[in-house]
Amino acid sequence: MKLIHFSDTHLGFNDLDIINELGINQREADFYDAFSQVIEQIKILKPDYIIHTGDLFHRPSPSNRAITFALEQFKIIEALNIPFIMIAGNHSTPRTNLSSPILKIFENFKNIYVSYNQEYKKIEFEDVVFHTLPHMHDESKALSQIELCEENLDNTKRNIMMLHCSVGAGYLMAEFGEWVYPHDKESLFSQMDYVALGHWHGFGKVGKHENVYYSGSTERTSLNDKRNSKGFLEVALDDSLHVNYHEIQIRPIKTYEINCEDYENAVASLHVNDTKDALIEVKLTHLTPLQSIDIQTRDIKNLFSEALHVSIKREFKQTSGEATLNDIEALSLEAYFLEHIKEESKPEEFDRLKGKIQGLFSAYEEVSDDTL
Ligand SMILES: [Mn+2]
């Protein structure tokens, strides 16, 4: 028996305010592209079942474009005549009953089976039972649902468990309302042929359990996710379990550090090749306040002219001996800042920077003065 396991596709996610030639947010388009790649691979690999372990959409109420895209893709999946089992993740679970669960839109597809009501659901076929546990808000209810799962084990068939949660505290995503699977119920995993997990965005087997896997997400929902490999799992369940990770093509992310104690040399020795269409993060370290004025964001961005996006983090050098700025009655941030620069720099340098600072502050005021 062959399964394709994928997860955390976060359709509708967007970021960075970059619009592509079709008028779509580029990062949003990247997520659609990643999803399509998995579907293309499914057509080739022809599994017996397809499973998705949650966070199909990024939001409980996705945009029209995200819903339209999903319906187009599920029409393709439907035509393959392969059962597709999907559970809700925390991102697709509404927090109140005022909103209807989005996964309900797939109820009328013949080959698509959805589990989303914060309840255990047994989805049964001739040779296999899928024990689905979608995202749960309420931990005591979750426990009763896990017990239902235990009672429904079927020794005459394969048993596959599907969950969207953190197993232990090690796989938390630092999001609101995450579900942590109870440690004393992990023993249930060994009674399953395979445990498919969603929520954690990296691929991996979970600790000591030989049959428990996160497939990871198909794209990165944060620039803090520096993984350059995303994909899906091909799971073979014959005499033994074989899990094969397939990588898809995603936009690369690269990080650079420029040590400003030796700025010129640090810039000269940067390896900026292979940055075409990439997401770039540059960390300026050991900055002094004066350098921070001189080193313009534009200059750094120009070093990576072919990149899709460059984000810059500025880390200041720790200084001892705080100045006497507390004594100054600053009339404005500009005056306060100018006074600080005056203390920190030589007179001729101060004259040069003064104009620049005033220019920056006036530009800021033009932008922020939208109250009129
Ligand atoms: Mn997720």
Image: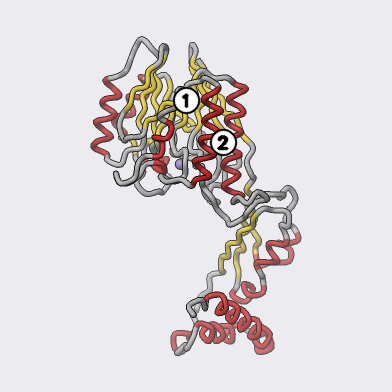
Q: Nearer the viewer, residue 67 or 328?
A: 67
Q: Residue at x 57, y 34 (%)?
A: 231
Reply above or below: 58 against 150: below
Disc on the earlier residue, 1 or 2: 2
Reply above or below: 15 against 217: below
Residue 202 seen in the current view: no
At numbered mark 2, what does the secondary structure look like: helix, strand or loop?
helix
Q: Measure the alpha-carbon separation of dots 1 and 2.
A: 14 Å
Reply above or below: 52 against 96: above
Q: Is residue 305 left or right of residue 174?
A: right
Reply above or below: 87 against 160: below
| Furthest residue toward front | 108
Amino acid beneath label 2: Phe
| Furthest residue toward top | 156
Q: Residue at x 54, y 82 (%)?
A: 337
Q: Which mark is residue 224?
A: none
Instruction: Tell me if mark 1 has few (under 14), some (14-19) or many (20+) residues whose alpha carbon lies within 10 angstroms of its own.
Output: many
- Where residue 193 appears, as percent x and y from the top left, is 42, 19
- Where residue 1 appears, as percent x and y from the top left, is 50, 15
- Where residue 16 appears, as percent x and y from the top left, is 58, 56
Q: Nearer the viewer, residue 170 or 195?
A: 195
Residue 247 seen in the current view: yes
Q: Residue at x 23, y 37 (%)?
A: 140
Q: Determine which residue is flagged by label 2.
A: 35
Q: Which mark is residue 84?
A: 1
At numbered mark 1, what does the secondary structure look like: helix, strand or loop?
strand
Q: Is residue 370 left or right of residue 250?
A: left
Snapshot quadrant of residue 123: top left
Q: Residue at x 29, y 19 (%)?
A: 152
Snapshot quadrant of residue 209: top left
